[in-house]
Amino acid sequence: LKNQHKTIAVLVDSLNIQPKSNTQLAENILENDGLLMAENYPGISVLPQLFVKRDRIQTGLSTAVFAIETSKNGGTRHAIERAITNDRLIFVPDYDKSGYSDTSIKQIEGLKHYSSIGAAEKYTKHSYEKLASNINDKYSELINRHG
C-alpha cells in the first residue's frame, strides 16, 4: 500500500476483520483497488483452525513467506509447512545477528528449526538485494512451471 501496489489480504471472514485493529488496514486495501478475500461465507464464527486453513491460500498466492517469529508449535509454522508443500521460498530473520538478547527464547525456536534443516534462509538488512533476486528467480520458475 505504501508503494501504491495492489494488495491482496486473505482473511478468514471478509466482514469480521481479525484482529479488529486491522479494520482500517482492510479499508485502505479496498480504497487502493486491492482485494479482501476469504473462502468462508461472511459472518462465519472465527475459529483458530480457520486461520490454519487460510495459510494454504496465502502461501499459494505468494512467491515467498517471511516468518518473523514462531515457536516449534506456533501458528506461523502452519504457513511455513504450507510454503514447503507449495515449493515457496521461506525467509527468517538471522536471529544470531538481529539483536535478540536471548536466542533460546520460545518465539524463535521454530525459525531456528526451519533454518537448521535447510527449509528457510536467514536474512539481514544487508541481504535484501540477494533476497529480491531469489524471489524474482522463484517467481519466474513458478510462472514457467504453471503457465
Image (spheres, rainbow, N blue to C red):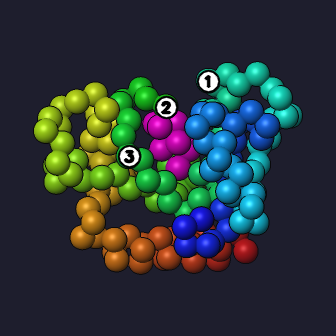
Where does the C terminus fall, quadrant-wise? Answer: bottom right
Q: Give the percent coordinates (x, y) of residue 98.
A: 20, 51
The image quadrant that residue 56 belongs to is top right
Alpha carbon of mark 3 to alpha carbon of mark 2: how far?
A: 12 Å
Horizontal relation, residue 54 to residue 127: left or right: right
| Residue 36 drawn above or below residue 41 | below
Where does the N terminus fall, quadrant-wise? Answer: bottom right
Residue occupying image coordinates x 76% and y 66%:
33
Alpha carbon of mark 1 to alpha carbon of mark 2: how far?
A: 9 Å
Number of residues whose C-alpha sits closer than 10 Å to that of mark 3, classed few (under 14), some (14–19) or many (20 or more): some
Residue occupying image coordinates x 71% and y 25%:
46
Magenta span: 76-83
Horizontal relation, residue 136 to residue 100: left or right: right
The image quadrant that residue 28 belongs to is bottom right
Query: Callout 3, which amino acid?
Result: Ile
Horizontal relation, residue 128 to residue 15: left or right: left
Residue occupying image coordinates x 46% and y 59%:
89
Residue occupying image coordinates x 38% and y 35%:
70
Q: Are marks 1 and 2 in contact (CB under 8 Å)?
A: yes
Q: Are marks 3 and 2 in contact (CB under 8 Å)?
A: no
- Residue beneath label 2, please? 75
The numbered disc on residue 68 is 3
- Residue beneath label 1, please? 48
